[in-house]
Image: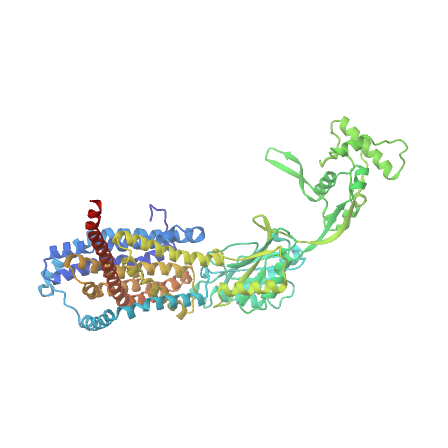
Amino acid sequence: MHLAGFGLDNLSLMALTVVTGLVVDDAIVVIENIMRHRALGLSIEDAAIMGGSEVVFTLLSITISVLAVFAPIGLAPGLTGRLFGEFAGTVGIAVTVSLVLSCVVTPCLTATLLRLTEARHPARSGNAPSEEESRVAGLYPRILDLCLLHPGKTVLLLPLTLLVALILFARMPKIVFPKQDIGIVSGGSRADGATLEDTRARIARFSRVMLSDPAVSHVVAYLDTSEGSSHGMVFATLRDMTDRRDSAATIARRIAAAMRHERHGEYHAQAPGNLMTRVGSNSSGLSYILRSDDERLPGPAARRLARALRRHPEFTNVEEDSDPPGESLSFAINRDIAARLGVTPQVIGSALSDAFGQITASVVYSWRGQYNVVMTLQDQFLHDPALLRNFWVSPSGGSASGSAASNTIRVTTQGAAGGSSALAATAFRNQIANALAGGVTASTGAAVATGTETLVPLSMVATLAPTLDPASVTHLGYASSASIALDLAPGVSLERAHAIIDAESRALSLPAALSGVLQSDEGDAGKSTQDSEMLVLGAIVAVYLTLGILYENPFHPLTILSTVPSAGIGAVLGLDLFGLPFSGMAVVAMLLLTGISLKNAIMLVDFAVLAQRTRALTPRAAIREAALLRLRPILMTTGAAALGALPLAVMGGYGMELRQPLGIALIGGLVVSQIQTMLTTPALYMLIAHLQAASRAYRARRVGEKAKGRGCDAPHDHGKRR
């Protein structure tokens, strides 16, 4: 792990916990096989050599299959690959090291310990089964014989299992990643047209309410001026989980309910997790984003849609990130009058920038450093929009070009008297003087002007009208956007939430220029579900190709892969039993179950294939012997894997939202997969062997018929040639 650049965190530690069952399985298979040969009367050295060499190919097939299972998730793009790449890499490193140790070190240690044990207790050199093992060994052969007697009916369990797995998967609520309790509750408040003072007072009240909650340790608040003067954020650090009973999500709902009586603004609170996608100003794990090329559309549409979604109980918290439109003044320049007066749009823009843009007019240097001289209006003029009606601009200093320059040459000043004509003449003289002086006295936005100029009222060349414009505009890519932060009620799936949002969008008749997408911490929620399905399918395809190459047979991999649907049923049933949704951790559990269930089937198929090749046993006799001899190691390996996953399912504390779905899905999948593997895999192996035998007989009969036909035609052809 150190050489690969991995660290010790929640995911890598979970991988080490889960892989404990996998690496112990290899040693169990080797030791059990050595003990079986020792019980047959071989010496310790011969038993160690024979038992270890017999399972080398089996362990190699198992390890390569596990690596093939985790290859898709390690190579997956996006957050899934970045997050679980370390998980998959840790598992791959562990099983590879386990293969080497199980094939080299385990037989040597087993032989050494057998010598020590038998030297002290000579009577225990055998491998006598216990009473429980004898009882199981007596029940299982009868069930196995019944399944092998009716292989066709037994194999029908496989499509039935697959159908049930698909139905359960379709009806389960799905999320991308479970929301984690990291001991933080974040909240925010906004109000229409509020000043900084109003927002500061509102955030102070919100902070006091948060701090009064018994589960809150301390609170930090700030004004989010990047989102306008009406928005503020509050972060509460919760007490340790051992000192509080409620989860962070429950505390967030309690704080939000305590602020509902406040009518001075909108308040929201949520429990953020370790994985967050921040779109706009909300940090909820789920967001609905509206985008449009027109910056005036997303904000009002988001507010209308948010009001409609608040009526649905499926959403516990709905907050939009866009402020209501604020009052503003729009300038409509009358270009005809401005041209007659010599006022260009550049002059108007420079004058307004000098007054309100807080530009740097100069730099003062001293021996201690340098200081910017910022030019701005006095405070009493900054808060009165009526100032713009008394604003004056200079008609000189504009950069005339093209037709404007040619028109300037034709201006005559004779007979000019008062009004617009006098101003035009003055503007002309100023431009001539600026040109002759090289623009030294031109009013171009500099802090100090040295020339005498005639000023023009801004209201004479532009029409000022009050309008409502967005206080801030959020961009996603090249489009303006507004997002709605959503918290789903327990048990509500992403598909259900998406259906409600689509229905409300159609009912509100939102503009066609708007497009919406539901995004979660992983990104697009719908795409995340499709990616999860593709990961599982990719793992199955990779395993099939790998096993096909190893066995040089296209049918044995199908027999081995038949155990995967039963593992999926167990995982989904376990999650449904405990009320947990299907998430990214369940996908990881499915991949782990694929590797573990394959190990059991590989041990059966590999032993049966070897028995057919070396001892010429029939398929039924070979698979029956394999199932009976491999029953104990399969039970031991499954029990070891389940015990390895048990701490994940029962341990609490921080990060349990990620651990519990993984552990529960693993245990449920192992139990169901174990039962079906020991029944359907032998039946399917025998059925495929019969189909292969029938296919070989058919091909042999066809070859014989063709050879017989060529033999009958030979004399006729010979006579014809004569």
The total of numbered circles placed on residues is: 0
Left or right for 2, reference 699:
right
Left or right for 274, reference 147:
right
Is the residue 76 above or below the residue 311 in the image?
above
Depth check, front residue: 130 or 448? 130
User: Which residue ends up furthest to the top in the rendered image?
Assistant: 436
Is the residue 300 above or below the residue 413 in the image?
below
Name the residue located 39 percent from the left edge and 50 percent from the top edge.
75
Q: How is the image coloured?
A: rainbow
Tell me if residue 205 can be seen: no
Name the residue located 41 percent from the left edge and 56 percent from the top edge.
534
Left or right for 305, reference 407:
left
* Residue 536 in picture, x, y percent from top left: 38, 58
* Residue 665 in picture, x, y percent from top left: 37, 64
Depth check, front residue: 528 or 120? 528
Quarter holding the C terminus?
top left
Tell me if residue 425 can be seen: yes
Depth check, front residue: 382 or 454? 454
Kindly indicate the quadrant of the structure image that contains residue 572: bottom left
* Residue 4 in picture, x, y percent from top left: 35, 46
Is the residue 684 above or below the residue 76 in the image?
below
Name the residue located 19 percent from the left edge and 50 percent from the top edge.
715
* Residue 580 in picture, x, y percent from top left: 42, 67
